[in-house]
Structures are given as structure tokens and as C-alpha cells.
Image: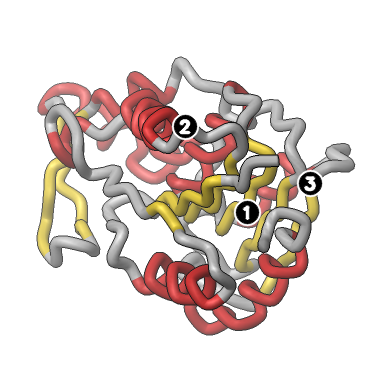
């Protein structure tokens, strides 16, 4: 049986050089597994043109280029949501590890910005946000919101799934992961006394990840 391709998908306004991406790359390398680290800021329109559909196309392109028959996706925040969407569409994805996955994207943007903020974003067609990988403000296009409306807020995933979420997460409330996991025997949710970054619990989340992915690791 062919070895699976492992892919890590970073979060919104982040990049493949983030702290968690580098941490996981080092851990997987030590386990003898190369980890694909695509940059979801790349593509038509760069960061401004980011959409879920474009990110899903990037995932498919990686698996196609690797001639992958099997895949394991690890995703943080928006990358976690993209990973779940990919698994719901692509039978090659056999397992998921989701870190504070950003489910229900349009509803959370609406809640965050309010009616006035959403109206301004819609009118200007872009919104300046703090881009952590670039260390500056960058505009995100309104296309992200419009495109997200066309995707399931909670993708129907059959693959074995591990969710790791901080109960003090103010960016993506843990309730979204609880809702996703409810009634799903293939989903294991582990909660930590941590925030959205999970940077103070990296070793515990790696231990959970390694144990969960044991059937797919060398």
C-alpha cells in the first residue's frame, strides 16, 4: 500500500513559516515523514484573493502532483476548515488533525464585524487585517466571504478526525468544534486550557497527534 502524503495547512493571515507549522514539520521529520507546507497566500490575487475554493484547489494540486493515493491533512484555524472541506470531497483523505478549525466562517465574520462593518467590507470590496506572516496590514477581498457562503459550514466528514481546541479561544469559539463533533463517532475532540494559538500546549497536542496518526505513520 502506498504511503500517505502529509499536508499542513496554515491559518488565516498566517503562513507556512508559522510557529505551529515549523513545530509540526520538525516533529514529522523526526518521525521520518516529509510534511507538505503550501502557502495559502499564493495564487490569483495573492492574499487579497484568498478563498476557500482556491485553497481547496491548492490541496488537490499537491495531491495530484504527488500522485497521492492516500493523504493525511493537518490544518490550523482556516486551514483546518479547508482540510475538513477537502476530506468531505476527496476520498484520498484518510485522516484529519484540526487545530481550532474555523468552521462556520461567514457567520463568524458577520458576528465579528457587525452589520456596519460588513456593509463597509462589501462596499470597499476589501478589508485591512493584521497579517501575522507579513507583519503588516494586508487587504482581504470580499470574495472570501462570498465564496464561503457556497461551502458547508460544518462539512460532512467520514474520515477519522482529531480536533484540538483551546477553551479560551476568542477567535474561533470552542463551541464550533463541539457542534461539529456532536454525534460524530469518527471525531475525537480534545480541549485544552489554551487560546487560539495553542502555543503553550504544543507538546501535548503533538502527543495526541502522534497517537492518533499511529496507523498512518511509518
Give whichever of 192, 6 is nearer the camera.
6
Snapshot colouring: secondary structure
Using the image, tell me which numbered label, if any, was put on residue 187.
3
Quick one: SS at disc 2? Answer: loop
Q: Give the answer, above or below, for where 190 lies relative to 124.
A: below
Mark 3 or mark 2: which comes first in sequence?
2
Q: Is residue 52 visible?
A: no
Residue pointed to by mark 2: 67
Quick one: SS at disc 1? Answer: strand
Quick one: SS at disc 3? Answer: strand
Distance from label 2 to label 1 (Cα)?
Answer: 22 Å
Distance from label 3 to label 1 (Cα)?
Answer: 10 Å
The C terminus, quarter of image? bottom right
Q: Residue at x 77, y 56 (%)?
A: 215
Question: In which quadrant of the rendered view does residue 127 lie?
Answer: top left
Using the image, tell me which numbered label, if any, was put on residue 97.
1
Amino acid at each position: 500500500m502506498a504511503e500517505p502524503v502529509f499536508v499542513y495547512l496554515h491559518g488565516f493571515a498566517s503562513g507556512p513559516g508559522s510557529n505551529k507549522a515549523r513545530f509540526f514539520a520538525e516533529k514529522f521529520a523526526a518521525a521520518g515523514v516529509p510534511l507538505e507546507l503550501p502557502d495559502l497566500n499564493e495564487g490569483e490575487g495573492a492574499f487579497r484573493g484568498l478563498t476557500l475554493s482556491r485553497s481547496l484547489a491548492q490541496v488537490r494540486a499537491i495531491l495530484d502532483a504527488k500522485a497521492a493515493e492516500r493523504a493525511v491533512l493537518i490544518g490550523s484555524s482556516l486551514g483546518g476548515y479547508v482540510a475538513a472541506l477537502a476530506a468531505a470531497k476527496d476520498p484520498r483523505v484518510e485522516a484529519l488533525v484540526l487545530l481550532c478549525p474555523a468552521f462556520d466562517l461567514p457567520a463568524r465574520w458577520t458576528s465579528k464585524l457587525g452589520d456596519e462593518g460588513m456593509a463597509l467590507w462589501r462596499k470597499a470590496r476589501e478589508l485591512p487585517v493584521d497579517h501575522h506572516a507579513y507583519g503588516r496590514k494586508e487587504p482581504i477581498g470580499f470574495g472570501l466571504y462570498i465564496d464561503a457562503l457556497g461551502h458547508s459550514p460544518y462539512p460532512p466528514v467520514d474520515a477519522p478526525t482529531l480536533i484540538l481546541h483551546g477553551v479560551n479561544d476568542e477567535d474561533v469559539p470552542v463551541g464550533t468544534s463541539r457542534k461539529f463533533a456532536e454525534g460524530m463517532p469518527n471525531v475525537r475532540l480534545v480541549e485544552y486550557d489554551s487560546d487560539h494559538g495553542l502555543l503553550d500546549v504544543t507538546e501535548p497536542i503533538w502527543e495526541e497527534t502522534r497517537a492518533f496518526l499511529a496507523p498512518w505513520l511509518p
